[in-house]
Image (cartoon, helix red, strand yellow):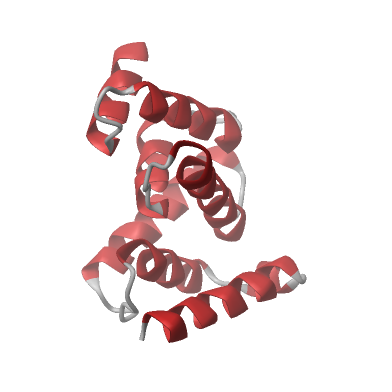
Amino acid sequence: MKQVFALISLASLLAMSCGGAAAMSTDSVAQEMTSLSLDHPVAADDPVVSETRVMLEQVSKRSGDDATAIFAACRRYAGHLRDAAHIRASQLELLAALDTYGKTGQSINDTLQAYVAARKAAADKTHAAAMAALAGQK
C-alpha cells in the first residue's frame, strides 16, 4: 500500500512540475499535502484537510504565492531536513511555521529557512523546539 501511495504522490509531483501546477486547486493541494504528511490517503472532507486549507489560504494571502508554490516549498525544505540533517519533518510542520511566523510581503523561503535553521539547532530536533525558538526571535 505504501508503494502505491508513493507512486500516486510521485505522479502528482510530476504533474505539478510539468506545468499542471497552476491547475491544482487549493482543495486538491490541501488534500495531497495532508495525505503526504500523514503517510496515508486522507479524504477531502477530513478535518485535517480543512485545517490545512485554511493555513494555505492564510499563507497565500500574506505571501502572494499560490497553494501549489507553498506546497512545493514545504516539500523542498522537508526533503532538505531529511537528506541533510536526517530530521523527519512533515510538510504540515513547515506549513505551520509559515502560518505562524510568516509576515506579509516576506518571502516564504525566508520563513522556511529560519525554521530549518531553528530545527537543526534545536537540541531535540523537534518541531515544538523549532517553533519555540522562532517565537523567541519575534
Rendered-image quadrant of the C terminus: top left
Numbered-mark total: 0
Which residue does the image show at 50% across and 34% down from the upper left? 112
Q: Which of 85 and 37 lies nearest the eye of the viewer?
A: 85
Give the residue at the far top of this rendering.
137
Residue 138 appears in the figure: no
Rendered-image quadrant of the N terminus: bottom left
Q: Position of residue 51 (x, y in %)?
A: 29, 59
**Quarter of the image holding residue 107?**
top right
Q: Position of residue 118 (x, y in %)?
A: 39, 24
As drawn, 38 above or below 118:
below
Residue 123 appears in the figure: yes
For residue 32, side relative to residue 46 (left or right): right
Q: Position of residue 89 (x, y in %)?
A: 37, 47
Which residue does the image show at 46% across and 25% down from the upper left? 117
Which residue does the image show at 45% across and 53% down from the upper left? 57
Q: Which of 121 and 101 lies nearest the eye of the viewer?
A: 121
Q: Which of 77 and 53 lies nearest the eye of the viewer?
A: 77
**Quarter of the image holding residue 31?**
bottom left
As drawn, 35 above or below 102:
below
As drawn, 106 above or below 86:
above
Which residue does the image show at 31% across and 81% down from the upper left? 43
For residue 7, side relative to residue 69 (left or right): left
Q: Which of 13 and 105 lies nearest the eye of the viewer?
A: 13
